[in-house]
């Protein structure tokens, strides 16, 4: 488990919509988005990099959004 402050902060652009967003590798906001195994597999095939918060949450399991 990483310690607070261990995150690597990167400015990225969503591969789905093109919006800029901040990635905190090692403790990112995306860790809180719940995806089914099927959705994860599909996204890994469909996209080459990260999705922004809006696009990733649109893919989230309906009971967790």
Image (cartoon, rainbow, N blue to C red):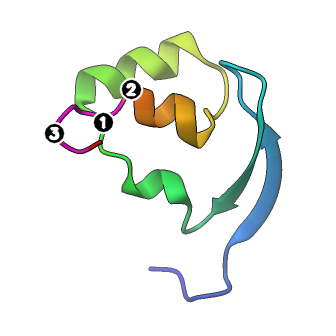
To which quarter of the image does residue 60 belong? top left
Q: Based on the picture, tell me whether residue 62 belongs to the magenta stretch.
A: yes
Asked whether, in this view, residue 37 is left or right of residue 28, the answer is left
User: Which numbered disc, 1 or 3, marks the residue closer to the eye?
Assistant: 3
At x 54%, y 29%, the residue is 55
Badges 1 and 3: C-beta atoms under 8 Å apart? no
Q: Are marks 2 and 1 in contact (CB under 8 Å)?
A: yes
Residue at 52%, 81% in the rendered image: 2
Q: CA distance from mark 2 to mark 1?
A: 7 Å
Q: CA distance from mark 1 to mark 3?
A: 10 Å
Q: Which residue is mark 1?
A: 35
Q: Which of the pair 46/29 is nearer the observer?
A: 29
State the SS at label 3.
Answer: loop
Q: Residues within 10 Å of mark 1 (few under 14, many from 20)?
A: some
Residue 38 image point, x, y percent: 26, 20
Q: Dot 3 corresponds to which residue?
A: 63
Farthest residue in the top direction?
46
Q: Tag 2, which secondary structure?
A: loop
Mark 2 nearby-residue class (10 Å; few <14, some 14–19, many ≥20): some
Quadrant assignment for the N terminus = bottom left
From which residue to which does the magenta span run? 60-64
Q: Quadrant of residue 7?
A: bottom right
Q: Which residue is mark 2?
A: 59
Q: Earlier in the sequence, mark 2 or mark 1?
A: 1
Q: Kindly report which numbered mark, 2 or 1, lies closer to the viewer in this rendering.
A: 2
* Residue at the (58%, 67%) spot, across then down: 26
Quarter holding residue 3:
bottom right
Instruction: State yes or no: residue 8 in magenta.
Output: no
């Amino acid at each position: 488990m990483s310690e607070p402050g261990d995150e690597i902060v990167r400015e990225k652009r969503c591969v789905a919509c093109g919006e800029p967003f901040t990635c905190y590798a090692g403790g990112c906001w995306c860790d809180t988005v719940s995806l089914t195994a099927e959705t994860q597999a599909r996204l890994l095939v469909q996209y080459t990099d990260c999705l922004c918060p809006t696009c990733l949450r649109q893919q989230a399991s309906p009971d967790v959004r």
